[in-house]
Amino acid sequence: MGTRDRILDAAADIMRTDGIARATTKEIAKRAGFSEAALYKHFDDKTEIFVAVLHERLPGLVDVLRWLQTRVGEDSVRRNLEEVVVAALAFYDESFPMLVGIFSERRLLEAHREGVRRLGAGPEIPNRALVAYLSAERRHGRINGDADPDEVASLLLGACLQHAFFRHFAGDPAPTGFRETAAALVAAVTGGIEPDR
């Protein structure tokens, strides 16, 4: 395993157990078994490490959203959305404990916000990708013309985030899968957006 991978594994481990606030570059380097200088050979700052952890060490929401853009007019909208929601449920469930700590201090949140914007990342990216897909499907007549893609994306992804919040708050064990929950959420939303046949 290379230096970069060891750094990302150490960062992901710290963020999962202690949150992003405690994942300092010094602690990440120490846990990875390197000097802090070695860390900076691969990453500009902690925010870049965080974004890399989200993209490379968590369930593949980014990959599923890329795949979704190729699915316009393919298969059923419901089935395509279920794939996104399964990935989003898994992603938010794993990332929620990492992310919640950034809201503990305004200074930390502002620095993080500025960093992710600089990297072209941020929590709104999944919504934008889902809106783009839904808008394309609406143009193809596969969802109702009066369905609002922004609201549908917010309902689906917001529900995924809420599931993660409730599970972690309650201390419930991690689910073994998300397929049933995804199907139920998508069915509840698509009942109002699919055109009458």
Image (cartoon, grey):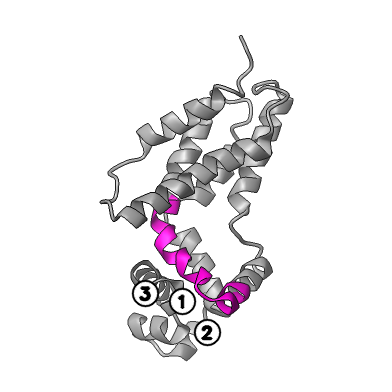
Task: Answer above or below: position of 121 versus 163.
Answer: below
Q: Are marks 3 and 1 in contact (CB under 8 Å)?
A: no
Q: Choose the circle earlier in sequence order: 3 or 1.
A: 3
Amino acid type, label 3: Ala
Question: Disc 3 designates what residue?
Answer: 10
Amino acid type, label 1: Ala
Describe the element under mark 2 as helix, strand or loop.
helix
User: Residue 64 bears which disc, if any?
Assistant: none
State how far apart marks 3 and 1 are (Cα): 14 Å
Question: Disc 2 designates what residue?
Answer: 40
Q: Which residues are magenta?
A: 91-111
Describe the element under mark 1 as helix, strand or loop.
helix
Residue 59 in view of the camera: no
State how far apart marks 2 and 1 are (Cα): 19 Å
Residue 112 is drawn in which quadrant?
A: bottom right
Residue at screen point 54% across, 29% down: 189
Amino acid type, label 2: Tyr
Left or right position of 141 against 41: right
- Asked whether residue 92 is drawn in magenta, I would say yes
Task: Answer above or below: position of 3 versus 146.
Answer: below
Task: Answer above or below: position of 7 versus 135.
Answer: below
Q: What secondary structure predominates along the stretch shown in magenta? A: helix
Residue at screen point 38% across, 87% down: 34
Q: Quadrant of the C terminus?
A: top right
Q: Choose the circle earlier in sequence order: 2 or 1.
A: 1
Residue 91 percent location from the top left of the image: 44, 52
Q: Are marks 2 and 3 in contact (CB under 8 Å)?
A: no
